Image (spheres, grey):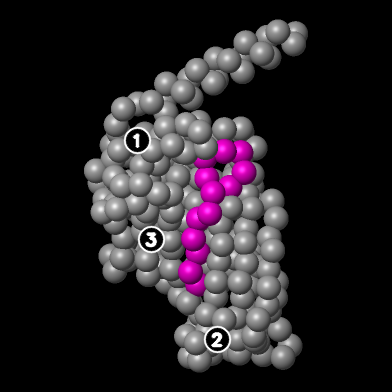
């Protein structure tokens, strides 16, 4: 899911392939909707690679957790990548986002042997593992988007056509130039692990605290991230001028 800057996310149309209703989430409705809008952006193009598969995603859960009694609606400051950012609640410990997606293995996802194609599995990892990074970024007020840099995929068992996959993706790190998430695909019919993977993404624009949410009241709070973003931009402008 590559992108040079996350500000574009606020101009995205409202998702139609994925509806907030029925999704277990502790994100405020506006933030949940924003995450779904971002996800749909990468499958909404008419002939974009794999879009027919991505449109069939059934998003079951999208939660941000960590510490004690986390409540994303009540924000407190935590440290992310050495900076204080808006978090999703109180308590100690690392905050993480978890996204659960289900879909059936159809023929357009299969290899000649009638099982999930390895390349299709990699596509699922890219989309699904990127989503908790977006969700955590939205909750914290930082840029959770970026360019996919590397994937480490282990294929455990085959998933025949007709299998139903439950894909659980969890954020690992966020808040700096490099972000990471892990992903597991389980065949719901037999409980077997199909694929396990880690995804690393890079934010080409630099520090991820550049992104401040500005739509529908999302990202309101201390304004710390916005001040830091402006200070960084001014600093970079001075550096560019000094090179001339």
Of 91 and 111, which appears nearest the observer?
91
Q: Which residue is mark 1?
A: 77
Magenta segment boundaries in residue numbering: 167-179
Give the distance between the C-alpha atoms of the residues marked 2 and 1, in whole angstroms.
Answer: 40 Å
Label 2: how many Cα within 10 Å (few below 14, some 14–19, many 20+): some
Q: Which residue is mark 2?
A: 192
Give the distance between the C-alpha atoms of the residues marked 3 and 1, in whole angstroms.
Answer: 21 Å
Circle 3 or circle 1, nearest the eye:
1
Type of secondary structure dominating the magenta stretch: strand
Label 3: how many Cα within 10 Å (few below 14, some 14–19, many 20+): many
Residue 196 position within the rendered picture, expressed as x and y whole percent measured from the top left? 61, 72
Location of residue 190 with respect to 43 vertically, above or below: below
Of 119 and 176, which appears nearest the observer?
176
Q: Secondary structure at mark 3?
A: strand
User: In the rendered view of the protein, which quadrant contains the C terminus?
Assistant: top right
The residue under the point 54% across, 49% down is: 173
Circle 2 or circle 1, nearest the eye:
1
Q: Which residue is mark 3?
A: 62
Of 7 and 61, which appears nearest the observer?
61
The residue under the point 70% across, 55% down is: 150
Please tell me the numbered disc located at residue 52. Answer: none
Residue 120 position within the rendered picture, expressed as x and y whole percent measured from the top left? 65, 72
């Amino acid at each position: 899911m590559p992108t040079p800057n996350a500000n574009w996310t606020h101009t995205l149309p409202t998702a139609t392939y994925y509806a907030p209703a029925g999704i277990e989430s502790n994100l405020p409705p506006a933030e949940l909707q924003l995450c779904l809008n971002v996800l749909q952006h990468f499958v909404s193009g008419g002939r974009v690679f794999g879009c027919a598969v991505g449109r069939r995603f059934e998003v079951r859960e999208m939660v941000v957790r960590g510490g004690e009694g986390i409540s994303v609606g009540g924000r407190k400051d935590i440290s992310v990548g050495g900076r204080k950012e808006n978090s999703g609640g109180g308590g100690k410990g690392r905050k993480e986002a978890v996204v659960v997606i289900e879909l059936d293995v159809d023929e357009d996802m299969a290899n000649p042997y009638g099982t999930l194609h390895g390349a299709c599995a990699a596509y699922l990892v890219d989309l699904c593992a990127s989503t908790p990074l977006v969700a955590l970024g939205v909750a914290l007020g930082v840029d959770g988007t970026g360019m996919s840099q590397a994937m480490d995929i282990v294929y455990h068992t085959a998933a025949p056509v007709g299998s139903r996959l439950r894909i659980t993706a969890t954020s690992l790190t966020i808040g700096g130039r490099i972000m990471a998430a892990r992903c597991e695909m389980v065949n719901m019919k037999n409980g077997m692990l199909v694929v396990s993977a880690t995804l690393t993404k890079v934010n080409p624009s630099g520090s991820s605290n550049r992104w401040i949410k500005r739509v529908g009241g999302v990202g309101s709070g201390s304004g710390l991230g916005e001040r830091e973003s402006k200070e960084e931009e001014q600093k970079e402008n001075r550096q560019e001028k000094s090179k001339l």
